[in-house]
Image (tube, rainbow, N blue to C red):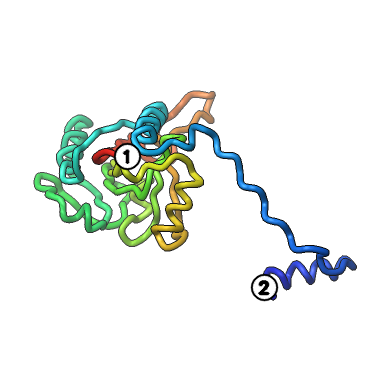
Amino acid sequence: MSAKAAILDGIRRAHGRGPLAQPPQPLPAAAIPARARDSGPAAVARFCAMAEEASAQLVRLASLAELPGAVKAEIARQKLDPAVALAPDPALIELDWTGLAVRRGPARPDDMVGVVQAFAGVAETGSLVLLSGPRSPTSLNFLPDLHIVALEAKKIVGGFEEAFAKIEREAGGMPRTVNLITGPSRTGDIEQTILMGAHGPRRLVVALIGDA
């Protein structure tokens, strides 16, 4: 008997109830809406539309090698210092970051630009799936004012069910933290006026890499 079964058995006995007449039946699978069933180019198109609706900025790149150039262009457009807090992801570290002051590791409170790579994207809502770990410190998703996330188009899935199945299948199970990010941080709590950057980045740029 498992520990969970032993606890539940003890609760039943304390209430004067005997063992279950039959084992509990599994719950039926949840209904998945049509908008969460897209795949391939259709999923990419829906992801882009939903991400932009959530106020994220999209940049299409042919390859990951173009990411540093896109980061420089965005920093120049925002008139920020050319300094970047970079996730210690080997795929990002090996890129040519010439012209930028790059520091690898978790974000600091004074970092203005953070660059990470997403594990997946969810077409249903235009959300990014970011997993915590040595290669992707969670602080990079919340402290910098400008959050730049590289996402391979082929990693976009239809809905959240598929995204979590992908985590179980490809990430070796659930990490300590899964961040689901849809657009930049905002709140409408104060007089129903939308305020950007309330609990995290004020701007979110998704660098969409390649095709599905």
Q: Which residue sits at x=41%, y=30%? A: 50
Answer with mark 2 or mark 1, whichever residue precedes in sequence.
Answer: 2
| Residue 57, above or below 27 | above
Q: Which residue sits at x=22%, y=54%? A: 91
Location of residue 18 by image quarter: bottom right
The image shows residue 97 at horizontal and vertical percentages of 13, 48
Report the label total.
2
Location of residue 73 by image quarter: top left
Q: Which residue sits at x=15%, y=49%? A: 101
Q: Residue furthest bottom?
A: 1
Q: Which residue sits at x=60%, y=40%? A: 31
Residue 3: assigned label: 2
Kind of element beneath mark 1: loop
**Residue nearer the viewer, 100 or 116:** 116
Please tell me how crowded label 1 is: few (under 14), some (14-19), or many (20+) other residues with Cα within 10 Å: many
Kind of element beneath mark 2: helix
The image shows residue 156 at horizontal and vertical percentages of 37, 42
For badge 2, the amino acid type reads Ala
Q: Which mark lies nearer to you, 2 or 1?
A: 2
Specify whether 117 is left or right of 76.
Answer: right
Q: Residue furthest right?
A: 16
**Residue nearer the viewer, 170 or 72:** 170
The image shows residue 56 at horizontal and vertical percentages of 35, 32
Q: Is residue 149 visible?
A: no
Disc 2/disc 1 C-alpha distance (Å):
45 Å
Classify the position of the N terminus by image quarter: bottom right
